[in-house]
Amino acid sequence: MVSLIVGLILIGFTVFSVLPSMPLDWGAQVIAFLKGFAPVLAAFLGLICLFIGAADVKDKREAKKEELEARAREEAENK
């Protein structure tokens, strides 16, 4: 409950600080920050996606190996 209230307060402050009709009028600075941060964010997200993809491939390989071992055990028990 506390996190919801804090979240709403922070969103309200963000809207208040970015709107041109409000006293802070940080809209231009926020846009400049987003323009500069976008390439860094894209590189960071790309790196995270690579790590997730590599872990997924590793998990699939291990699952296939375990499945083959289970089949081999099953066949050995049936003989």
Image: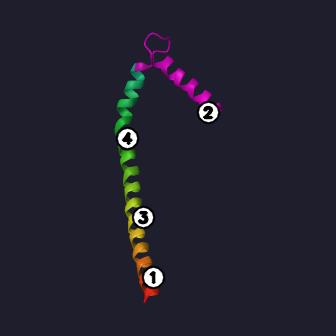
Q: Residue furthest bottom?
A: 79
28 vs 38: above or below: above
Q: Decide whether residue 3 is among the magenta residues.
A: yes
Tag 3: amino acid: Asp
Question: Magenta stretch?
Answer: 1-27
Mark 4 and mark 1 lie on one chain; the one further toward the N terminus is 4
Which residue does the numbered mark 3 point to in the structure image?
A: 59
Q: CA distance from mark 4 to mark 3?
A: 29 Å
Which of labels 1 and 2 is toward the front? 1
- Residue nearer the viewer, 76 or 34: 76
Mark 4 and mark 3 lie on one chain; the one further toward the N terminus is 4
Mark sitting on residue 40 = 4
- Residue nearer the viewer, 59 or 68: 68
Tag 1: amino acid: Arg
- Residue nearer the viewer, 16 or 32: 16
Kindly indicate whether the residue at mark 3 contacts the one at mark 2 (C-beta within 8 angstroms). Answer: no
